[in-house]
């Protein structure tokens, strides 16, 4: 059974940075495109960033220029570097193997003003 586990969330002041990590474990050949989603209080889950197995990336307009998604295929990890954080970035962040129902449990990111 394949599992995704996120880590790296926490509390940070506005303008600060956090780095999230998601590791895939279990029996699988490879995971293609991966994505980070987030769900803020009272909001729907939204796509934040995606990355293909070849490293092509895409970002939501709200995080462009501030967040960077990357991956290490050898380690089965995907990362989300978040800089210049804003209070509106407060959410539970999830990683997902795109096109599948495989999700992590989420990690809380809280940005104080």
Image (tube, rainbow, N blue to C red):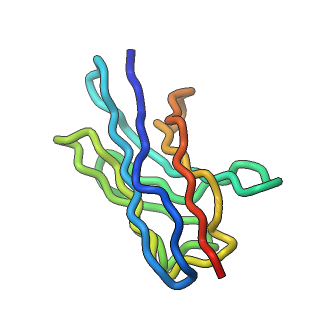
Q: Which residue reaches farthest left?
A: 74
Where is 113 relative to 30, above or below? below
Q: Is residue 23 left or right of residue 107?
A: left
Q: Position of residue 21 (x, y in %)?
A: 36, 51
Image location of residue 24, percent across then percent down: 34, 33
Quadrant for the C terminus in the image: bottom right
Say which of 104 and 36 sits in front: 104
The residue that appears at 26% across and 23% down in the rendered structure is 29
**Which is more toward the observer, 47 or 89?**
89
Relative to 24, residue 91 above or below: below
Q: Residue at 42% across / 68% down in the picture? A: 18
Image quadrant assignment for residue 55: bottom left
**50 to 83, vertically: above or below:** above
Q: Residue at x 17, y 41 (%)?
A: 74
User: Where residue 12 sits in the image (x, y, percent)?
Assistant: 51, 72
In the rendered image, residue 72, in percent from the top left (x then y), is placed at 23, 49
Of the 4 image quadrants, the one containing the N terminus is top left
**What is the quadrant of residue 2 in the picture?**
top left
Picture residue at 62% right of the left edge, 72% below the top: 61
Q: Which residue sits furthest right?
A: 42
> Does residue 112 sit above or below 35 in this rendering?
below
């Amino acid at each position: 059974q394949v599992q995704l586990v996120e880590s790296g969330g926490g509390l940070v002041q506005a303008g600060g940075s956090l780095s999230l990590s998601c590791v895939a474990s279990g029996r699988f050949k490879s995971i293609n495109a991966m994505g980070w989603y987030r769900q803020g209080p009272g909001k729907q889950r939204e796509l934040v960033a995606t990355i293909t197995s070849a490293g092509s990336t895409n970002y939501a307009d709200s995080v462009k220029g501030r967040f960077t998604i990357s991956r290490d295929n050898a380690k089965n990890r995907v990362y989300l570097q978040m800089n210049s954080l804003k209070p509106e970035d407060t959410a539970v962040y999830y990683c997902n193997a795109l096109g599948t129902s495989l999700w992590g449990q989420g990690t809380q990111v809280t940005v104080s003003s």
